[in-house]
Amino acid sequence: MERRSFLKASAALGCAATVTGCKTSSDDVNVIPPKPPVEEQQTWSACLVNCGSNCPVKVFSQDGVITRVEADNETTDEYGVNHQIRACVRGRSLRQRTYAPDRLKTPMKRVGKRGEGKFVPISWDEAASTIASELQRIASEYGNKSILKLYGTGAYYGFSSSSCFNRILNLNGGFLNIYGNYSWAQQNEAASATGFGSTSGSNLLSLKDSDLFIGLGYNPSEMRQSGSGEGYDYLKAIEQNSELEVIMIDPRYTDSMTGKEDTWYPIRPGTDAALAEGIAYEMISSGWVDANSKDFLTKHCVGYDKASLEALKTEFENSGDDSKLEYVPYITPEDNYEDYILGQGKFVNEGPRTPSWAAKICGISEANIKELASKIMNARAPFIITGAGVNRHANGEQAMRSCYMLSFLTGKVGQPGVSNGALPGQRSLSRSGMSGLTNPIKEQISFFTFPDAIERGHEMTARKDGIRNTADLDTPLGNDLKAIFAINSNALVNQHSDSNGAAKILEDDTKCELIVSCDCWMTPSAKFADILLPDTSWLESNDLVNDSYASGIMGYLVAMKAAVDPLWECKSMYDMCALIAEKMGKLEEYTEGKDEAQWLAELYEKTRTNGNNANSIPPLPATYEEAQEQGVFRAFNDTPSIALESYINGTSTLRTPSGKIELFSLSMALKGAQWEFDDKVKGDYISGLPMYQATWEGYDDDETSDEYPFQLVGYHTKGRTHSSYHNVPWIREAVEDAVWMNPKDANAKGFTQGTEVHVWSKRGTIKLPVRITPRVAPGVLALGQGAWYEPDPAGNIGPSGHIVDIGGCINTLTRYQPSPLAKGNPQHTNRVQIAKA
Amino acid sequence: MTEQIQYGFYLDTTKCTGCKTCHIACKDRQGEVIRKDNNAIDQGVPKIEGVNWRRVYEYGGGTWSENADGSFEQSVFSYYASIGCNHCNEPVCVKACPTSAMHKRREDGLVHVATELCIGCNSCAKACPYDAPQLDTERKVMTKCDGCYDRLAEGKAPICVGSCPLRALDFDTMENLIKKYGEGDGHIAPLPSQSVTSPNLIIKANKHGGRAGEILNFAEV
């Protein structure tokens, strides 16, 4: 924008009023073009990335070419009744993404060194034969546990989904399972240890009954952009409750604020637990908890005070139940929350967790922490959400649990307008999807630990590495990984931590002997494939999908119809896996005698008769073909849901060992005592109590703070969903990829807006522009995650001693260090340095 | 003289999250207007870089200070403004045009470019305080938001309006918009005073409107 033009325009004012008469509309360019000779077609498709919503898109095509993409504008758009499911910036760019120059157009095989990105086209026959014979060879030579299907979320199909690969892998005798995911690994563990049935709390409809909303790292306006999604629900909930005070706590001033907030408290990454403890100290030391919520804590929770743990220990000792007796040695009444927060009993040497103590760590002042505590205590119905950003840290499990504690200290969980600290509840319609068949292999590794499984899978155990479903804590997994199937997955190098380190392990094709990648585009992970399989894009697909997993209150189904035939030699996952199954001699078992149309008819029929879809608008028609013509089916259930309501107000018990909300987690205490940790890794331990856990490269890690003075935190940029859509030039122009820096820090470094910088950690160097903005806390850098890893082809070495990643991928900087309990990704825990490039 | 139709936009800056959906929805249609001959299968879909009929400005400011214990105090704010063309009553772009290519249509008040008359001199772009004229450097002609006149003829709203996930945009005759929203709150930064061009844009002001700040996203607009 050129501001100088403003002054110029002012000078031109006086005569501007005459211009309306100066020109007619006779110019040809303005005449509405005649109807095109070939009729334009309109079909429904959907955007199937991992943002939480599968928005429908209306696709226009002409003569076999997609001409434009529009949104669902089909209803009268009344919120809470039939509001439209408007695709965001990403869905609207699908035409450019579909025809991207880096589309994979034919099957290919690697010819250079692995990871170099040198491929030659091969036939589908050769691709399928190679995969079938390699699968058989690797299974017989190393065992089925040496085959992994990598975590991947680039295409949430219902029918022609990555489950088609599960089918062929299972028909080959099975494969190693994974648990957890890059989004929620630590919070899944934290929620379950505390007693939540899931990571969902009250839904945003219940905000109408609240008078105080606190979001810790909660950012629906950027995370959940869909026009029917959680971001829209959040906006409507705030608009409709004029009494609601909105407080946001985040290292960034996010787009979930921009006028919707009453107060922003900037916080240092990874220090949320310290803040929570400072607030808890105020609530407890003031006598407020004793006076207001002690009964709730006694009745519904264990671990608040010494007496609750003593009583539990006695109960368990006398239970005669082996599953309870197992925990008895680890119930230590002196490890209670009250003593810990007040710095008494066992914790007298640590001292109390006062606001003054917390302020030094988290960056929120003592006065503001007291103010926050006072608001929470005085609120009629405090609704607290802890976003998943808090969980993606080296101390993520405990940080989530520490934040959850605040809701319980109020004693109001279970009441209207109150939540339990978890993410908001969602609603969905249900679709039936392709079965992956049954996997005879039971062992699981954390999704995150595949590099370890390549190098030392044979010795990995439950005790050291969180392996699940082995015979006991010390029975090793027994196999190294020899084959990886990366299906719509960019987690091989790009979305995994330490991209340089992961690349190095994968480059050695004597370790992992086979990498198969199935994708639509040449992603940084696809470059590491031995065999590349070109998938059809959504716009070339017939499929049946629902709203996905975090799409807000509006539930929906989309009956997708291919706008154009498969482009180039691309095949759907169903079809390509059928070719592989045929080469395996398992075609009949794979297809079950059905073709695509028959599968879709069957899955549609199961979907149509599912009771959860009974209120769909319009009702689901008799056939899938009719559903495809209609495209979108929706339903809004306007009943508020309240977290833990049936437990607090009913008679149900929770699935914790105690059956109660566990402030002191028995399962974590047990694992903390039994598992093996690395004492060279600061913060690698598990405790039963949620405690602020100082970790490697945390704010207070003085071992790294001199050399790497800045904390670097990732965030979900509006311009991608994780790494999906990175290769769309329109969006790259509209949403800049730059590292955010506070003006104070930028001035000290002598940077100006847009200065090209190197950012580096112990693990690598990236190059990108700096965005100087007051919207990030001093001492903190913020970078939208998901940019594509691109080691400089010129081989330039950065300050870290690695080839500079000119793609600006945050994971070039992140550390591969599985978190203590979830063995998850600590990708927001980073210390870095920055300088002019 | 009977009163003529004048179309205009409405923008609610309390709702806009700067998501850029309008920007991209516009670009998808724009490509079909100014790159009609493109062969997508062989050539991909054109970038048309730097030619953005709709842009989203990020405006913000505030100060930071540090307490003795290292904790922060700040007064930071930000909000967004999505702008296409305001099809002004006093369009300085038209005045600035040496060839009369830039013109305001009598029948609906939309400001259009007659491409065959345009010499690509960029005078209109320099005059406009909203960056509405966007020079197509490849074809060396000026382009801009045309109010989706083709969609209007079919009874549809401009592509940006129906794209907005937050329902922050609207478009209609000014008469209807005023009936629906009133005159609005007056324009807020980074928009110039309405007195400059008499824009047909009603603004609902963000609560931070009126605070001193600057445009934070020059690279995106």
Image: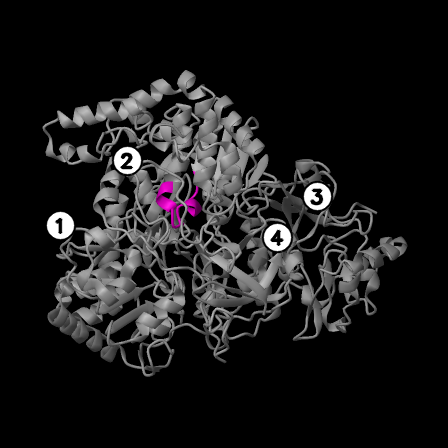
Q: Do the residues labelled 3 and 2 touch (CB within 8 Å)?
A: no
Identify the residue under disc 2: A665
Marks 1 and 4, the one that precedes in the sequence: 1
Q: What separation in Å lies between label 1 and label 3 (alpha carbons)?
A: 68 Å
Residue A751 picture location, percent across and down? 65, 62
* A172 to A186, vertically: above or below: below
Compare residues A178 and A156 and report the one nearer the observer.
A178
> Seen in the image, is B151 located left or right of residue A810?
right
What residue is shown at x 88% (from left), y 56% (from top)? A11
Q: In the image as oriented, which residue stretches furthest toward the front?
A: A349
Identify the residue under disc 4: A742
Amino acid type of the residue tagged 3 in the rendering? Ile
Say which mark, if any, is on residue B202. Answer: 3
Q: Do labels 3 and 2 share a chain?
A: no
In terms of secondary structure, where does tag 1 sit? loop
> Seen in the image, is A133 located left or right of residue A201?
left
Tell me if residue A390 is in the magenta stretch: yes
Amino acid type of the residue tagged 4 in the rendering? Asn
